[in-house]
Image (cartoon, grey):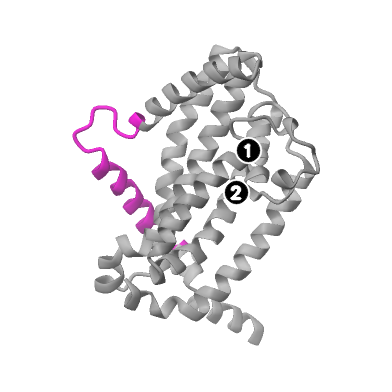
């Protein structure tokens, strides 16, 4: 009975639990962000999908020639990779500025910082859902067949998003304290783009290459991309993503516990 009371008390005072319970608030704010950003626009966030479609078609056609790869293989690979990278990169770029840009909420409303974090994540997932239209178009154009393995993309996506949330806890706090982090982060995300197998096939480098083994993005991509292209992700991707989740969550929980009370002072 005492243990149950302790668990109940912990849940009541845990910011993450409180933020998850306030799902109606951050979902509403995320949708409001999208509505405000694209107000008076005829197709709204589908502009992002349209521009990404043009980018994938142009780059896929040109690079399939440069790399001497069949366009029927390269274009689906590039399109799916780029849609997933769009979700990962947009969140990594937003995290350092998240609390600074939402300072009125933090100062005036004393809102739970993790509610703001989940708002940003939800907003980008909505955009990601729009961009899935590109993958649907690829399936239709290349007459790709759906198989049961595509369902593995769902737990893969959940695991990747949990990793991104864990990274976001640390990155948003550090970004609120040190404003230069945002600029450094932008450069690092660009480097990650070229180091990750987005425009090039993983088979082009040795399997034991550090570029793949030490790059979490490579595992994240494999978890979602492989099922969408008709094959199961490797077991090493599941294991690596689970391991990074433990590391990022532990680091985020420790940093949040020590520094969350200072966020209103920093922003």
Mark found first going from the N terminus, 1 or 2: 2
Residue 200, by quadrant, is: top right
Query: In this picture, is 202 found above or below 59?
Result: below
Query: Which of 244 and 116 lies nearest the eye of the viewer?
Result: 244
Residue 265 against residue 240 in the figure, above or below: below
Crowding near pointer 1: few (<14 within 10 Å), some, many (20+)?
many
Say if mark 1 contacts mark 2, CB within 8 Å: yes
Residue 160: numbered disc: 2
Residue 206 vs residue 81, the one in the foreground: 206
Name which residue lies at 50% across and 68% down. Answer: 17
Looking at the image, residue 30 lies above or below residue 266: above
Q: Nearer the viewer, residue 248 or 125?
A: 248
Q: Can residue 23 be seen in this view?
A: no
Q: Which label is found at residue 224?
A: 1
- What secondary structure do most residues of the magenta stretch adopt? helix
Q: Is mark 1 on a helix, strand or loop?
A: helix
The boundaries of the magenta stretch are 20-47
Magenta run includes residue 155: no
Residue 133 location in percent, x, y? 47, 26
């Amino acid at each position: 009975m005492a243990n149950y009371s302790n668990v109940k008390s912990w849940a009541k005072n845990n910011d993450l639990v409180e933020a998850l319970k306030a799902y109606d608030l951050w979902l509403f704010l995320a949708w409001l962000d999208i509505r405000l950003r694209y107000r008076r626009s005829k197709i709204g966030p589908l502009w992002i999908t349209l521009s990404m479609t043009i980018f994938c078609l142009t780059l896929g056609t040109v690079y399939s020639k440069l790399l001497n790869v069949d366009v029927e293989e390269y274009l689906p690979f590039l399109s799916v990779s780029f849609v997933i990278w769009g979700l990962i990169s947009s969140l990594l770029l937003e995290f350092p500025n998240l609390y600074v840009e939402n300072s009125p909420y933090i100062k005036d409303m004393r809102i739970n910082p993790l509610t703001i974090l989940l708002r940003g994540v939800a907003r980008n997932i909505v955009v990601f859902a729009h961009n899935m239209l590109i993958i649907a178009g690829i399936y239709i154009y290349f007459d790709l067949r759906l198989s049961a393995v595509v369902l593995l993309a769902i737990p893969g996506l959940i695991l990747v998003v949990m990793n991104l949330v864990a990274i976001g806890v640390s990155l948003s706090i550090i970004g609120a304290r040190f404003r230069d982090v945002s600029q450094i982060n932008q450069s690092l995300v660009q480097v990650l783009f070229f180091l990750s197998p987005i425009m090039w096939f993983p088979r082009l480098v040795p399997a034991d290459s550090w570029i793949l083994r030490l790059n979490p993005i490579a595992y994240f991509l494999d978890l979602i991309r492989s099922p969408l292209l008709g094959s199961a992700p490797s077991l090493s991707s599941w294991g690596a993503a689970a391991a990074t989740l433990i590391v990022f969550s532990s680091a985020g929980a420790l940093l949040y516990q020590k520094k969350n009370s200072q966020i209103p002072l920093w922003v």
